[in-house]
Amino acid sequence: MRFLDPTTVFVSDRRLLGGPSIALEWGRLISAIAVVIWLTTPAIGFLRALELMTVIGFVAAVFGFARPSLGLIGLSLVCTLDPLTRQFLAGGLVRWNTFNYLLLVVMLTSAMFVVRLGDPHSRLLKALLALMLAELVISPSLTNGVQHLLGAVTMFGLLVYFAQARDDADSLYSVGLVNGLVTAVGSLFFYINQSSLPEINPNVFAFFPETGLFCICFGFRAAARQKSGQLILGVLAVMNFAWVFLSGSRGGLAIAAVCLLFVLFSVRGVKQRLGFVAAAGVMAFLASNVFADLQGYSLHRITKLLDDDQSAAARTSGRSDLARAGIHMATLHPFGVGTGGFAPTWASLGFLPGMSSFKRGEEFQAHSGWIKVLAENGWPGFLLMAAYVGSFAYYGMRSRVPGGRGLGLLTFAALTVAFLSTEFQGKGFWLLAAGTTAALHPAEMVRCLRIDARRFAVRPRRVGVTAAVIGKDDTPGQAERLAL
């Protein structure tokens, strides 16, 4: 094995379907398959269609481990489907932690890469995880603590995939196209079949189109290179925003609004903007006429949040009580009650002034990453988490990577809002964090890939390879690929 001159990269001289790039071919192929599967929902049922989509995602992620384009598309697809598979397929086709175990295997296989990561985001997250691990010793609920830790640590497994395709614009566009279509079409059939499906928490379902929006934001950076690319992804973004709105999840709606603002500020050209307006009009008509009951429910939820005549607990569905309790725990235990200890500590709190009787005496999770870390890991954990989330804005503003500023600010805003209403189990948020980490620090990704070079080296294929010299005007970081 050897490294070639850093100005040389290798590209395949044949394509699967004779198209412009392998990444675009995989993206178009999987997108077409996904749409066909969703369209068969009336015949096979929503859950069977979901099973087929999940199998495709896992197969692509596993077999694409050494093929960056396919692997990243498959991995992002599994992340996107994760909220639905956990709800509808757990215990059947997919066990609760199947995806986490896959990511742990990826981390172990690429252990040197993970260990040597030295970018500021990874260092801060490693420090937070080390604190959480140490405080398992004092946790009153070890099972909850391990699950909480597992939800966050697997971010490094996601980062392994992103590091390989960090500067491949076609791969990133394909991620946005595939997942944007999967969530836009899949959500439509979910709402059509909702009455015949098992009950699902609206906040959980909202993760599905939200993750599609995250992927669209990744792809939007590269969409300008594709014919009508921004228009296509923009229309999909509007559709997914509408599905989040109809879910009635107020936290999800805030996250979706952040993503939509990113897309609106990133769009170029009058044609694309007119396309957004048309898509918004169509979705507004659809929501008002086809899903009028869901629209009414969502508007009621928003109006309730703004109603001063109701108590804070009623307006926030008990979240204000959980926040007060978390602050109270941190006041009594500045170093936390132990990772995973919020629920049992909440159950034993009893009466606190200014709080309602919401879930009093029951074990109940914090439903907020900020409050959970503050209560369980104290002020040190809260400050580390704030530094981690804030680091995306800081280094995004200083980044010289094209599109890095917007991506850094998007990740900062999305994580800030997301952790107000969710904890660490949502894979979509970690997908966003991993992708932004790889995008903002390409040199660090290359350095760590070289340490793990035997695993990540490009292997010869029977179709052969053709060398292409990268000039000075090409994308920064593109010349840092590895080859045999």
Image: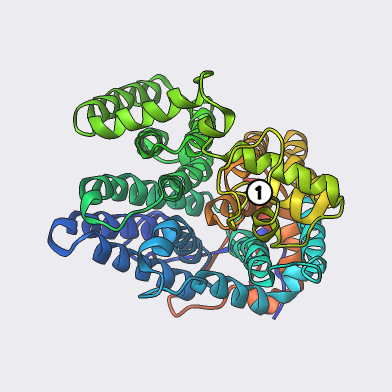
Q: Position of residue 443 (x, y in %)?
A: 75, 55
Q: Position of residue 310 (x, y in %)?
A: 51, 24
Which of the 4 image quarters holds residue 147?
bottom right
For this rendering, which residue is in front, 444 or 181? 181
Q: Amino acid at mark 1?
A: Gly
Which of the 4 image quarters holds residue 242?
top left
- Give the side of residue 155 with respect to residue 59, left or right: right
Quadrant in the picture for the N terminus: bottom right
What colouring method underlies this structural image?
rainbow
Q: Position of residue 12 (x, y in %)?
A: 47, 66
Q: Report whether residue 402 is seen.
A: no
Quadrant in the picture for the C terminus: bottom right
Q: Position of residue 238 (x, y in %)?
A: 38, 32
Q: Secondary structure at mark 1?
A: helix
Q: Label 1: how many residues lie within 10 Å, few (<14), some (14-19) or many (20+)?
A: many
Q: Report whether residue 218 is seen.
A: yes
Q: Which residue is mark 1?
A: 369
The answer to whether residue 464 is above or below residue 353 is below
Q: Residue at x 73, y 38 (%)?
A: 400
Q: Residue at x 68, y 49 (%)?
A: 350
